[in-house]
Image (tube, grey):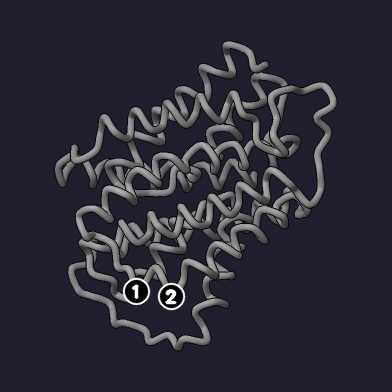
Amino acid sequence: MPTIELILLFTLIGAATGTISSIIKIAPTLIAIPALYFFLPVFGLSLQEVMLPAIATCITAFIPTYLYAWIKSMKHGEVDTQHLINFAPGIAMGGVIGAQLLSLVSFLMFKISFTLIALIAILNIILRSRTKKTSSIAIGKLAHIPIGLFIGAMSLVSGNGGQTLGESLSTLKTVDHKQRQGSINGFVVFASIAAMIGFIFPAQSFDQATLSGFSGAIHIPLMLVLACSHFFFYWLCRHRGNALDKSVLSISFVIFMVCSLVRLWV
């Protein structure tokens, strides 16, 4: 079983990710994974050693919150159903593949993938502030599955549930602003649930002979702690924050991402 200190760490990470992702709609893993990279050495661990279980636990823990947000959006008609139907099957298949690949790739490959997704997340925040609409890109039916596969697989290999690339896709397709976040949440739900299957049956197991509480690569006790903390603070902060709050948090997130990438590579 995890120590009290480790439970407290995951509780604080859940509080931070729930609050920030509720207000500025960014992928919580972009905060959780750097936080684990910074603080796991305090417990005699490193992200490199426990990369698969750490990422699997985080992505799985965020599923209930995304599912809640997606269902709320569906009830209010704030989901582009056709957009979801076009790409969700490929994203789900890519989620399973990405979860399997994550158990095989090296930590260097993960760092490269995470860096790419972090830079795209920063670009997404910059594009949000633009008042001028981007031109819509036409995507043929035959490209829906391959694009979905790429988004799902790339997202999971980088430790992301699909929100960052899903947002980029929705921006390129110029999905209606009111339906954009609901559609992105749907992508993440499909990718994350599919990835959970891959995490339960990873392509390559890790040494957990002295550990307990695992289901495949997912640490159930810490997953529940993170899930409850994240969901509570997400629910507490929903519909809060004015334009100034969102601007300050967005700038703070960009600074945090830059510092995290510098620390990850240096």
Structural distance between the alpha carbons of marks 2 and 1: 6 Å
In the rendered view, would you say 161 is above or below 264? below
Where does the image place residue 248, in percent across and percent down from the top left?
A: 25, 42
Where does the image place residue 42, in percent across and percent down from the top left?
A: 64, 20
Question: Which residue is more in the foreground, 177 or 70?
Answer: 70
Specify the amino acid type for callout 1.
Gln
Q: Residues within 10 Å of mark 2 (few under 14, many from 20)?
A: some
Give the residue drawn at x 14%, y 42%: 242
Decide if residue 82 is on the left or right side of residue 46.
left
In the rendered view, would you say 169 is above or below 48? below
Give the residue drawn at x 29%, y 33%: 235
Specify the amino acid type for callout 2.
Asn
Where does the image place residue 109, in percent across and percent down from the top left?
A: 71, 56
Q: Which mark is residue 82?
A: 1
Secondary structure of residue under mark 2: helix
In which image quadrant can residue 17 be found? top left
The residue identified by callout 2 is: 86
In which image quadrant can residue 14 be found? top left
Give the residue drawn at x 69%, y 34%: 215
Question: Which residue is more in the foreground, 255 or 29?
Answer: 29
> Quick one: quadrant of the N terminus?
top right
Q: Are marks 2 and 1 in contact (CB under 8 Å)?
A: yes
Q: Which mark is residue 179?
A: none
Decide if residue 66 is on the left or right side of residue 242.
right
> Quick one: quadrant of the C terminus?
top right
In the rendered view, would you say 203 is above or below 222? below
